[in-house]
Image (tube, rainbow, N blue to C red):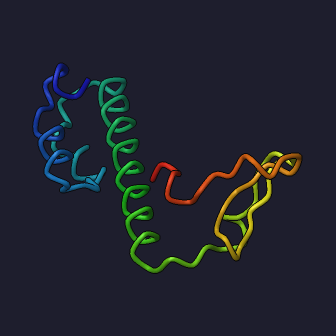
Amino acid sequence: WLQAAGFPQYVQLFKDCRFPIDIKTAKNDHRFLDEDSLDSLCRRLITLNKCTEMRLELWRSKHKGDDWDEEDSCAISPNWTYDQQTRQWRRLDSNDEVLHLSACPAG
């Protein structure tokens, strides 16, 4: 959307990992836009800022160590449990189904 709407600079900044963007500065740069267009631009930039924050949090958590917090070992389903010693998920009704930690996607 940003590229098609005439804001290629923000696409490039995002691709170059130069986010988060200061929303106030972006608003000042585009004061000529009508209120709806400016709000739409800001919503999209805020979304990209949040994506950047989530990426940074994921990176930080990966680099701070292998220790899992207790909440990381809690499944929503009562049919699964996490074994801290083996670092594996297993279905409570079967010993055959085991999900190894290394098989989990990173995000």
Identify which residue is drawn at 37% across, 63% down: 56
| Residue depicted at x 43% and y 69% | 62
On the image, the x and y values in percent for residue 7 come to 15, 31
- Residue at image coords 34%, 44%: 48
- On-image quarter of the N terminus: top left
Which residue: 17% across, 19% down? Answer: 4
Question: Vertical placement of 106 versus 10: above or below?
Answer: below
x and y, in percent, of residue 3 in the image: 16, 26
Provide residue 24's location: percent of width, then percent of height: 29, 52
Number of numbered discs visible in the structure rendering = 0
Q: Nearest the camera: 79 or 100?
A: 100
Q: Quadrant of residue 18?
A: bottom left
Horizontal arrangement in the rendering, residue 98 relative to residue 61 (left or right): right
Q: As rendered, which of 46 and 33 lies closer to the eye?
A: 46
Relative to 88, say whether 9 is above or below: above
- Horizontally, residue 69 falls left or right of residue 16, namely right
Closer to the camera in the image, 23 or 16: 16
Give the camera-side residue of 79 and 5. Answer: 79
Residue 70 appears in view: yes
Q: In the visual, does 59 lie left or right of 10?
A: right
Q: Is residue 107 visible?
A: no
Residue 42 appears left or right of 68: left
The image quarter containing residue 87 is bottom right
Q: Position of residue 36 (x, y in %)?
A: 36, 24
**The furthest residue to the top:** 4
